[in-house]
Image (cartoon, rainbow, N blue to C red):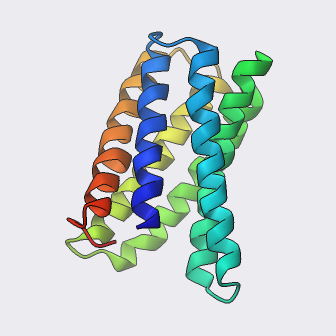
Amino acid sequence: MILGLTLLYVGAVLFVNGIWLLGKIGDKEVSVINIMVGVLSFMIAVYLIFREPDNSAAISAGAFTLLFSFTYLWVGANQFLKADGIGLGWFCFFVSITAAFVGASSITNIGLNFELWNTLSWFAWSALWFSFFCLLALAKKIQRSVAVYTLFCAVFTGWIPGVMILLGIVNA
């Protein structure tokens, strides 16, 4: 259920960030959801890491969750600080490469159930964070494409699976 909770709010923050990238929400307003989801996912990650210090799967889940927590907190901070986002872009590159490795390592667990979605989501997140790197650190003129892909990821890697897990439709 913790995964469902996390994914629901990841879907929410990605959805709002996608709308923001389309220019429909102001910088200061979008920072609110980024900070709230950043804090929530940070608390979930810390819980996973320290709840069972000998549980390597929980520690891994917590460590990888922190990558995204820090991203959301950084986006929120950048809006208040009016920062250019270049440093965040380079962090997104690091997250992208890490997510690609996690996706590749999860290929061995693929079945026709949640594991397939999990593997595809890691690759989708890797591509999304790489697009943030290109947009922010490399200043590529791809904002609209990144916005649309962010909305896609919000719905199909966060929101829908999060709701399905929380409703007990899918066991994760």
Q: Position of residue 41 (x, y in %)?
A: 59, 53
Residue at 61% x, 15% y: name it.
Answer: 27
Residue toward you, 106 or 140: 106
Q: Position of residue 124 (x, y in %)?
A: 40, 48
Query: Is residue 167 placed above or below 75 in the rendered structure?
Result: below
Work out which quarter of the rendered image holds the C terminus and state it: bottom left
Query: Is residue 152 placed above or below 137 in the rendered structure?
Result: below
Work out which quarter of the rendered image holds the N terminus and state it: bottom left
Residue at 36% x, 25% y: name it.
Answer: 148
Question: Is 94 left or right of 122, judged from the image as shown?
Answer: right
Residue at 54% x, 40% y: name it.
Answer: 129
Q: Quadrant of residue 35?
A: top right
Q: Position of residue 145 (x, y in %)?
A: 40, 22
Q: Quadrant of residue 106?
A: bottom left
Residue ranking furthest to the bottom? 54
Query: What is the total number of numbered labels drawn onto the structure image?
Result: 0
Residue toward you, 83 or 122: 83
Q: Can see residue 122?
A: no
Question: Is 141 left or right of 118, judged from the image as shown?
Answer: right
Q: Can see residue 167?
A: yes
Residue at 49% x, 36% y: name it.
Answer: 13
Q: Position of residue 43 (x, y in %)?
A: 65, 58
Query: Is residue 99 placed above or below 49 in the rendered structure?
Result: above
Residue toward you, 158 or 92: 158
